Structure formats: C-alpha cells, structure tokens
Amino acid sequence: ITTDDFMNDWVNAISKKTTADFTSTYENVDLLLVDDIQMLQGKDRFQEEFFNIFNKITKSQKQIVMTSDVLPKDIPGLNARLVSRFMQGVAYDIQKPDFPTRLAILKNKSEEVGISIDNQTLTLIAEQIDTNVRELEVAFNTLTLMARAGRPINVS
C-alpha cells in the first residue's frame, strides 16, 4: 500500500466510525509493504496510528517493508520513536542502476513479454534513460504497445 492510501483509509475509517475494522485489517497481515513512508512527515496523527500498527505487527513476529526517498533518519518531521523503530531493521540505499543493469533489465523484459527488440535499440534506451527503473519500464511499455500495434521497433 502507499502511505497516501494508508492515510486515506484512516480518514475514511474515522468518518465512517470503522476504526476498529481499519486497525484489524492492518494488524492482521503477514507482511505489510508500505511505499513512500516519507509522506508521513509532519503528520502527527497518522504517525501515531502507524506507530501503533507497526508495534502490533512486529510484536506478532510479522514483517514490514517500507520504501522511502531517503533513510528514515533523514526524513524531516518524522517522530523520533518512528525513526528509532524503522532503523532497527535493515536499511538499504538503492541507487539508480548502472548501464549494464539497465540493459539487462530491458533484455529480461523483452524476453518476459516475448517481444524481439534488437540489441542496438535496447542499448539506446539504456543509454538515454538513466534515472530509475520506473522510467525504464515506462519506455519499455511504450515499445511493447508499439510492437503489439504492429509498428516496427528499431533505433529510428
């Protein structure tokens, strides 16, 4: 779930007076994946609710995986006790992929969807898109649509 979705679910639960259902839903997962945890910055009430859920999940020996643009200790406006809890786990700083990795991702994607794209074209894309994997996938998905529409896929 995204952090925005978590916060929207909480707001909806409060407005519908179903906070017990909300809490139960989140506390009874085996694994909670939360994207963009930095979105909690400066939102004290949401941080409090997330803190409670976090504690109950981890005390139940279940797992939470969170993503963020920065390490928890570098998120301004994030409650110190959340930072402390988040840093008890394993933190990885994932950098943008290098050229060989980008090219390998594109080759794997083309094999995965069964579309033949020449190496020169994949190389050009891997050279041009060096920011992150999401943008690389967007470019590849565009090629996939073109190929399925019968358009030739080549450097031009």
Image (cartoon, rainbow, N blue to C red):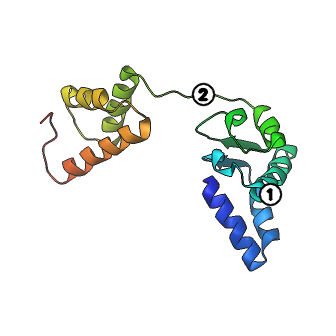
Residue for point 36% across, 26% down: 104
In the rendered image, the quadrant that contains the N terminus is bottom right
| Residue type at tag 2 | Asp
The answer to whether 32 is drawn above or below residue 99 in the figure is: below
Q: Nearer the viewer, residue 75 or 124?
A: 75
Return the mark for residue 93.
2
Which numbered circle lies on residue 49?
1
| Residue that extends furthest to the bottom in the rendered view of this protein | 16
Q: Determine whether the residue tagged by mark 2 lies in a helix, strand or loop.
A: loop
How packed is label 2: few (under 14 Cα within 10 Å), some, or many (20 or more)?
A: few
- Which residue is at the front of the view, 145 or 18? 18
For the C terminus, give its image quadrant. top left
Under tag 1, what secondary structure? helix
- From the top left corner, tell me how far across and down residue 140 is, in percent: 31, 41
In the rendered structure, which amino acid carries the disc numbered 1?
Glu
Residue 145, horizontal then vertical, whole percent? 25, 51
Question: How many residues crowd mark 1 within 10 Å: few (<14), some (14–19), many (20+)?
Answer: some
Which residue sits at x=37%, y=20%? 100
